[in-house]
Image (tube, rainbow, N blue to C red):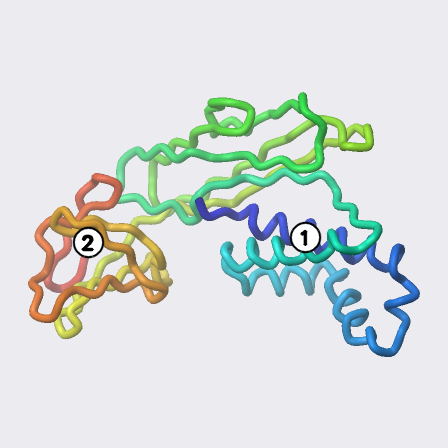
Amino acid sequence: MTSPSSHARLDALLADLTRVLPETHGVLLEAEEFQHGAAALRALASRSRRDRALARLSAEEAAWIAGEIDARWRYLEGYQTSPFAGLVLPNPIWSAGGKVEITVGLAVEGLQSGWEVKWSPQLRPLSDTEARLQVNDTETVYNLKVRVIGRSLNGKRSILVAEAEVRALKPKLIWDASAPAIVISDGAGTPAADLKLTLDGVDHVADARGKIAMPIGADMPRDIRLGGMALALTAEGSTE
């Protein structure tokens, strides 16, 4: 699942890095050869600058960078990160309309076993780490918040909050007969990258531009489905 928590995890890691590294390796950061790195660290300590940098990353990019920072930081003496909780779910949620249920995962790091979770009212708990979200309408924003109460690895009481603002969208399909291809976007025209559709019984995945390329000479698909639900596509490219 893609996840807003990829960004949240990277944000928490960067915040820890900017707090801890000057304390544990301040002498090195003052050396001339590390001035560029020290300046970058000071920039990342700014909440607004961090937000702007994170906004430019996809969930996959944020997850990869977080993994690289965590792995490399572990080589240094003084590695320490704060407890973290994040929600794992698709974002946006694409729907052909009607009711759709989505699994929401909870990732928790840095707490002793036995922590307690309080799910937001929209979520139906399945376990301590999974719940279900029922999506009733498209073009809707769902604000999810989960609280996790426990003790950190050093025994301190911790209250963590995992939040996600999730959009539910209905895809808009345009048939490009000249390509031929189906071009998929949301209501604002943003490409529906990586969206999976079933066309005449065959699964296809949109590329980064929201396109599903069809064989040369192919006709417009007659049966288009998203999660088993039908989408109607006219020659003019509108969905009903």
Helix, strand or loop at disc 1? Answer: helix
Query: Which residue has dot 1 on it?
Result: 70
The amino acid type found where label 1 is placed reads Asp
Q: Amino acid at mark 2?
A: Thr
Residue furthest to the right = 27
- Farthest-out residue, bottom: 32
Left or right side of 169 for 35:
right
Other residues around mark 1 within 10 Å, as few (<14) / some (14–19) / many (≥20): some
Query: Residue 109 is drawn in which quadrant?
Result: top right
Q: Give how far apart the Cα atoms at labels 1 and 2 are.
A: 44 Å
Dot 1 or dot 2: first in sequence order is 1
The residue positioned 18% from the left and 58% from the top of the image is 238
In which quadrant of the rendered image does the N terminus lie? top left
Where does label 2 land, which residue? 239
Choose between 205 and 67: the one closer to the eye: 67
- Mark 1 or 2, closer to the camera: 1
| Quarter of the rendering containing residue 148 | top right
Image x and y of residue 237, in percent? 17, 62
Q: Is residue 81 above or below residue 33?
A: above
* Residue 32 percent across, percent down from the top left: 87, 78
